[in-house]
Image (cartoon, rainbow, N blue to C red):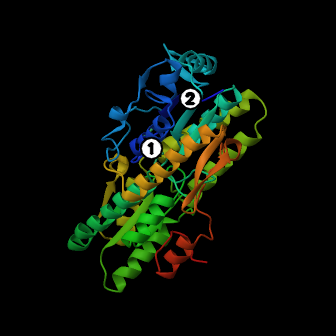
Amino acid sequence: MAIRKVGVLTAGGDSPGLNAAIRAFGKAAIGYGWEVVGYRDGFRGIAEDRRVKLSKATLSGILTVGGTVLGTSRDKPHRMPIDGETRDMTDQIVANYRKAGLDALVCIGGGGTAKNALRLSKAGLDVITLPKTIDFDLAGTDATIGFATALEIATDAIDRLHSTAHSHHRIIVAEIMGHGAGWLTLGSGLAGGADVILIPEIPYTVATVADAINRRVRAGTNFSIVAVAEGARSVEDARALAAAEARLDAAGERTAKDAARSEIELLELQHTGNTLRLAHQLEQLTGLESRVSILGYVQRGGTPSPLDRLLATLVGTAAADLVAARTFGVMVAARGDSTEAVPLNEVAGRRHTVPPDHPWIAAARHVRTCLGDEAP
Ligand code: F6P
């Protein structure tokens, strides 16, 4: 049967380039002669059947606009808070997809979206995902929509923080997003010439960081920029988290699972404020005034960079081609300067973190950036 109608939604955190992807898929789909609808606020929108028709007119003028014109949410189809209780909305989503007469649904999002889309695909929907995350922690793709822009913003911030750091002879600790992955911090730290870069993949020792800063002072440079990933942890904290995660993996029965989950929650809670604690510890160990800049949501906002627009346009249009070819249950990955369809079950549940032998790590060590560990 011919394709007649397709849907699109954005899920997970907002990110520069989402609108460029909606536009690319939508325009290509209209070019194929299909009707296109957009669902509001991620998977919640399809669960509640809130949709809007996307025409050439609504898709025009959004290429450079930040965020997502459709809205987004972190709601999961199988665990959605509805009227004060958590409900499995999978069957409702399937019913709403059928009611709308959809032939395919394109979900633009990161790792969580891949998992949710795989679930919907197993429930019988024809689903394709597009890779989006500023964290670049999504498996199976060479690039993700949003990372290039966030990298530019974080690098620009590090550049600017140098002004105050060198003028006031201070340590400035810049906290950078990335969830459990260090790509954004390592990339912007390297590009911005941070003196210390701390990422989740390399647990740090505060004394090692302080030593590196004190060495700079002895050599005549009395300021330092520390780029710290929000997920970076000291050796002790990383050990405690890994042990709790191992207990969760090993837990057989529900009570053991719940106990391990609460332990992880507590450790996450204790991690809040880690950057402030680190700055305080460094001030005490070096005698230099320390300040903190938490870059936060600034990294996700505003106009997408040309690279993100290009990527979004490439994967968005490739998704329409895949729908036309009836290739479903896949993510459109960026591969070299082209795209590739990767089965969702090879993406869902896998995380892309910085490998210890990555060239960016080697380059950072070569230029004598402190990574918080004892350099091998
Ligand atoms: O995944 C993108 C991201 O910005 C992460 O870097 C960060 O940990 C998280 O989202 C913040 O989530 P929220 O938007 O739910 O506060």
Residue 337: % across, % down: 54, 62
Check disc 1 and report its element: helix, strand or loop: helix
Front-most of 261 and 120?
A: 120
Give the position of the N terminus as an image quadrant.
Answer: top right
Say which residue label 2 marks. 76
- Mark 1 neighbour density, 10 Å: few (under 14) some (14–19) many (20 or more): many
Say which residue label 1 marks. 24
Query: Which of the 4 image quadrants contains residue 92?
Result: top right
Residue 64: % across, % down: 32, 47
- Mark 2 neighbour density, 10 Å: few (under 14) some (14–19) many (20 or more): many
Check disc 2 and report its element: helix, strand or loop: loop
Give the position of the C terminus as an image quadrant.
Answer: bottom right
Residue in the picture at 60% in, 27% down: 103
- Contact flag, marks 1 and 2 (Cβ < 8 Å): no
Front-most of 229 and 307?
A: 307
Residue 211 seen in the current view: yes
Q: Nearer the viewer, mark 1 or mark 2?
A: 1
Residue 50: % across, % down: 44, 20
Where is 82 relative to 68, above or below? above
N-terminal-most mark, 1 or 2: 1
Q: Residue furthest right?
A: 252
Residue 134 seen in the current view: no
Instruction: Kindly identify the amino acid type of the residue bearing the numbered disc 2.
Output: Lys
Where is 88 relative to 300, above or below? above
Residue in the picture at 40% in, 32% down: 70
Q: Residue furthest top?
A: 83
How far apart in space, not on screen, are marks 1 and 2 (Cα)? 25 Å
Relative to 247, 128 lies left or right: left
Residue in the picture at 67% in, 31% down: 121
Number of marks in the rendered image: 2
* Ligand 1 quadrant assignment: top left
Residue 375: % across, % down: 57, 77
